[in-house]
Image (cartoon, rainbow, N blue to C red):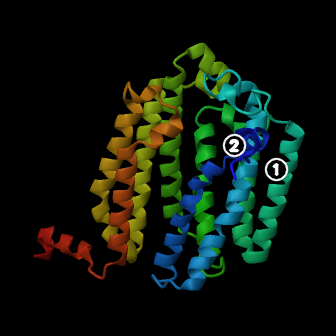
Amino acid sequence: MHFPTSHRFHPTPRVIEYLKICRIDHWLKNIFILFGHMVAIVLMLHMQIDFDVILTAALSLIPACLIASANYILNEILDAPFDALHPSKKNRGIPAGKVKIPILWAIMAGLVVAGFALAFLWFNWAYTFALFLLLFSGFVYNVPPIRLKDRAYLDVIAESFNNPIRLWLGYYALVKPTQALAPLSIVLAWWSFGALLMTGKRYAEFRFIDNDELSGQYRKSFKTYTQRRLIMAMITYANLFCFCTGIAMASYSRLQNLVLVFPLILVAVIVYFHYAMSEQDARLEPEQLLKHPLIIVSTVVVAGASLWLLTTEVQFVELLHLLNPERL
């Protein structure tokens, strides 16, 4: 039977606006939890993967996604006055008057309760504490008077702290804290990598607005930032990432093969810098920059090569000893 167009089912626009504020599409960022799973599987589970490991890893994503959405709601509520000054964010639900803030607070509370209930039910105290840190980081980042989002450099350090938090969520979902703590060198490397991405996002956003007065009104930290300072920060975080990664590879024999991935990492970093600093991509939203095909491809190649080198039985790093004259 044919129904008139007006009688067909469509989600109500208001519901869609609430879902947008929960940023379900941004749950993809929790894929970084898989990195914590891999650290646990490689260093503690000795590459032994069964159905229970896969199920536990999958379940560990659910509380993290719920708390992430709670943080996004908090961010949208507190940032609404500033989003109203942004060229495109002014069309979001709150500044455009499409949603009711009391309802958002209620949704946020429900997400927090559900997230921690599942964490208590499924996981150990270390996972639950990491989940608390994920929620707490959202408050420290967004809520005055601390509101690290408004403080130059600290904004990036605080936001990228979600990287080690997600590493801990993945790691402690599979490993009890009494067995072994997550390696500090890997935690710091992952933190530096996140800071590199966040600084690149700031750089792209700074150029996207392309107005010193307006950018300072939108984000207070932009009153301190300049293009030169943001570029220097990106270089610093890239070097810290490589340094900490090198320490991790030297410290754990199972990771030593990954030294061969360094050339690919350098290529990926160069690709990222190229597009973050190009005139054409300066007009893109920061999130669109990170979706550039070559950035995605270079990241996938690094991840694929790393996975292969971790699973192979051949110790390629031993071949490098042949280049040492003292071993001949």
Instruction: Choose the circle earlier in sequence order: 2 or 1.
Output: 2
Label pair 2/1, CB-CB below 8 angstroms = no
Identify residue type, mark 1: Met
- The image quadrant where one finds the C terminus is bottom left
- Can residue 293 be seen in the rendering of this structure? yes
The residue located at (31%, 49%) in the rendering is: 266
Q: Which residue is mark 1?
A: 108
Q: Nearer the viewer, residue 13 or 24?
A: 13
Instruction: Tell me where residue 290 appears, x and y as whole percent.
Output: 46, 42
Pinpoint residue 73: horizontal percent, then vertical percent: 76, 44
- What element does badge 1 sit on? helix
* Residue 140 in view in this figure: no
Please state if 67 lies on the left or on the right of 280 as rendered.
Answer: right
How many C-alpha atoms fall within 10 Å of the one at disc 2: few (<14), some, or many (≥20)?
some
Question: Residue at left 26%, top 80%?
Answer: 314
Which mark identifies residue 20?
Answer: 2
